[in-house]
Amino acid sequence: MALKIFFAGTPEFAAIILQRIIESDYRVYGIYTQPDRPSGRGQRLTPSPVKKVGITHNIPIYQPKTLKDKSIQDQFKALTPDILIVAAYGLILPLSILNTPLLGCINVHASLLPRWRGAAPIQRALLAGDKETGVSIMKMDVGLDTGSVIRMNTYAIQKTDTAATIHDHLAELGAESLLACLPMQVENKCSYTPQNEAQACYAPKITKEEAFLNWNQSAVLLDRKVRAFNPWPVAKIQIQDQVLKVWEATVLENSRLTPPGTILRADKLGIDIATGEGILRLLKIQPAGKRVMAAQDYINAHPLTVGTQLLAVTA
């Protein structure tokens, strides 16, 4: 008897995992994803990355605004799923939904649980300076990423990693881990490890306000922010009355006492700015309405004066 898999997910992370499932020997009978959202300057309704994969492979798609309605729960039961695989779906699964599949609901989460439960585990791991992260395959319960862990795979965070690069690594790692678990789940051979609640921490959503850099903070922390907020919402600073996005930076040590926010150097190597501790060298920046450019190209068009004190930027 074929395994009747249903999938629930929304963003690109989930779409990559869904694609890998489809490319395997398993069949996906239906997809749950969030409703189309306005996007772009024209605010046109745009399907989620998961929906796009589903359309490509002619898989039935369901887009309820909530799973709390009894009619939606009854519809799901009528589909008689054997298992529901969830990855970054974005909607709460009520107990009725969790209890419907014969083999339960399995979640692919982008952290080493119980560390970084919640919406933004990749960004929070970077901001905290974690040395490693990874993916957890978890048997879902009614809590927020609180279920027992079936499998974990780690990824060592590199000094140049951004949220974007880690996202891609973990999506592939998550698909690999999931596909390794599925046969054992079907044969009821999985072992379930309860999470240690004493070690749990929460990863709240990233806000646009967090992206503005505060020069009183250390260069190390500001570099983490630059990497954590790439590709969204992108770190921001203010130079010459312009708010610039910072796409890439690096940390330099500095033993002298200089007021935070002071421009120390501006040349072909980049733009060096004093921080509360150390120097942050800007390497790639983006003026409003312009392309991403090397700091040197920005300097050529907008000469900077060494010793200038940069203003703090607020949302």
Image (cartoon, grey):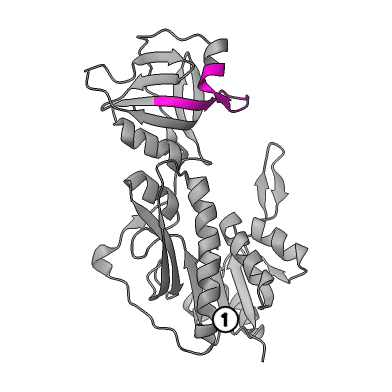
- The quadrant of the picture occupied by the N terminus is bottom right
Question: In the image shown, does 40 or 239 lie closer to the viewer?
Answer: 239
Residue 236 seen in render: yes
State which quarter of the image contains the C terminus: top left
Mark 1 = which residue?
A: 83
Query: How many numbered marks does the figure carry?
Result: 1
Q: Residue at x 59, y 64 (%)?
A: 17
Write the residue at 34% across / 78% down.
193
* Residue 89: image location, x then y, percent: 55, 63
Compared to residue 308, the image places residue 43 above or below, namely: below
State whether residue 283 is above or below residue 234. above
- Left or right of residue 43: residue 68: left
In percent of width and height, residue 127 lies at 36, 44
* Residue drawn at x 72%, y 38% as measured from the top left: 42
In the displayed structure, would residue 238 be above or below residue 181?
Answer: above
| Stretch of the chain drawn in magenta | 281-297
Q: Where is residue 46 shown, x and y percent of the image?
A: 70, 51
For label 1, count other residues whose C-alpha is less than 10 Å away and answer few (under 14), some (14-19) or many (20+). many
Q: Nearest the camera: 135 or 252?
A: 252
Apparent side of residue 127 relative to residue 43 in the rendered image (left or right):
left
Instruction: Where is residue 205? Give x, y as percent.
Output: 44, 50
| Residue shown at the point (66%, 83%) measured from the top left | 79
Q: Secondary structure at mark 1?
A: strand
- The type of residue carrying mark 1 is Ile
